[in-house]
Image: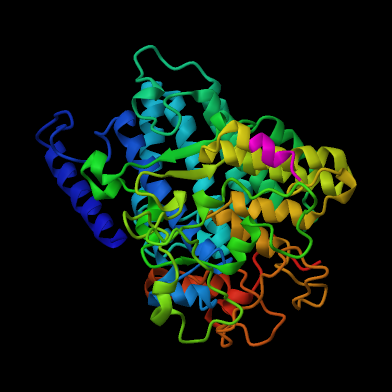
Amino acid sequence: MKKIFSLLAIAGALMCTSCDKWLDINDNPNNPNTQVPTVELRLPSILARFAEAYESGGTRAALISQQISGTTANNWNLSRWNISTAAVNWPYQPWYIYTAVNIPDMIKKGEATGAFHYVGAGKVIWAWGFAAFVDMYGMLPYEEAFVGGNMTPKYDEGSLIYERCLAELDQGIEFLQRTQDASAPTLAKGDYLFQGDAQKWIKLANGIKARMLNHLSKTSQFKAADLLAALEKAPKTAAESALYQYQDRAVSNNSLTESLQFQNNASNRLTKLYIDYILNNYTGAPSGATNMEDPRADLLIPRFTATGLRTPGVDMAVIPEAGFGSTIANYAALRPTANVSSGSIYAAAGAKGLLLTSSEMHFIKAEVLFNQNNKPGALQAYKDGIKDHMEILGVPAAKISSFLASSSVVQNANSLTLSQIMIQKYIALSYSPEVFNDVRRLEFCTDASGKYNEASGIYKGLKRPGAVFDVALPSDDMWPRRFTIASYSINYNYDQVIKADPDAADATYTAKRIWWDVKK
């Protein structure tokens, strides 16, 4: 597809060169080209396509991280950690082909027309996307990605992309703080995410920065002070969170506006692990005399409409290699469907996409403070993370207060564990790419030997699947660490892939740690 676009661009350039010799006219607004669309027309599509790419990565992260399991070929492969190129192609395509390629033109147009807030938003999305997708794939074309018709761009390592993206975020903040030219369109005209609130975009940029800095926790580059400083400027309330509102086709009459999790989870089902986490049924879960069921349970765990019973979860530790396709009727669907399943709030057609939330920021703070032995601060941030996630999901305030005061939530700072913090964050990051970043960064549920150990591991009960793809992960100390390279690059840019990382051809490549996922 890129080649087609480039050939068209070359042909167009030749035609324009010939025309210029005898005719000097302005661009025809009825003849599509990269110069005509205004910034307020570009941003909605960029946002929509970014959400599609990002949330598609989130579905795949949820499958690998055992929040959900699938029955279709690709989704079942991801569930058993056979991370095939076919299974992880889609996040790559909407990012490169539909989103990132359009951002430079919006930035250029914004600079030319004094629409500086659009320039800032473009830089934030650029950095957000490249940072998110290099976390998934480990390496990506960056410096040569959109350079003059180059069909075989080199692959860049994640550390370089992080450096560039952090700089882009700072530049984006600078543009968002500038006063636009009086003739420039207001950000509100094209901003479906924050309705033109530049301050929320600035908070988002700082939230992305905090997320990225937190990923460095096992590296020598990690600086807790810088991370905490970014968190101070990041979203702190549910209202400041980046929530992408999808529309049910019953409202929009367009299936393309339905939520990505609705579209992606037609045949996926919840796992036993995910349900156990929500119901505090795991080793080391907080418990006591005033236990209370999590008020998010009925929003996240489907019930069979006919019986009112909750779905069981797929036990990934014992499910056979053939999968659970023949028994899928035993599990309630994730999509809310009248007379069938109450579904999950995330998989409703008109759901919100939780792209970056104040809840996530609180949990990042809780982790950092916990590791600094600031247990009281960590406890407050842990509770704030739970509260904000509940607010985003629409849980009534009275139920939130009751749950936070119950023994199902840690009340004594000295009793708080990192596992309890991260399991609550796992719930708050449902269907997010960040859940895969966390489980590998915190070593799943393993000890120093890399083998499953429930006593010392963080994600209690997260075991290697019973049907694990042992070609890629042949020993029990091997865990998934990255997506495989998308087939587009394998088919058309193989030499550059292998030049960047010869291991990309190995059967065990998805077990290779990415640059920040170092073994301590």
* Residue 405 is inside the magenta segment: yes
Whether residue 234 is visible to the viewer of this picture, yes or no, is yes
Q: Is residue 482 above or below residue 122?
A: below
Question: The N terminus lies in which quarter of the figure?
Answer: bottom left
Seen from this angle, which residue lies furthest front?
307
Q: Residue at x 71, y 45 (%)?
A: 364
- Quarter of the image where one finds residue 342: bottom left
Q: Residue at x 36, y 22 (%)?
A: 113
* Residue 393 is inside the magenta segment: no
Q: Is residue 324 above or below residue 346?
A: below
Q: Is residue 466 above or below residue 210?
A: below
Whether residue 100 is visible to the viewer of this picture, yes or no, is no
State the predominant SS element of the stretch in magenta: helix
Q: Residue at x 45, y 49 (%)?
A: 345
Observer-nearest residue: 179 or 66? 66
Question: The C terminus lies in which quarter of the figure?
Answer: bottom right
The image position of residue 434, as x and y in percent, is: 59, 54
Q: Which residues are magenta?
A: 400-406
Q: Residue at x 38, y 49 (%)?
A: 348
Observer-nearest residue: 386 or 457? 386
The image position of residue 143, as x and y in percent, is: 51, 53
The image position of residue 63, as x and y in percent, is: 51, 67
**Colouring of the image:** rainbow
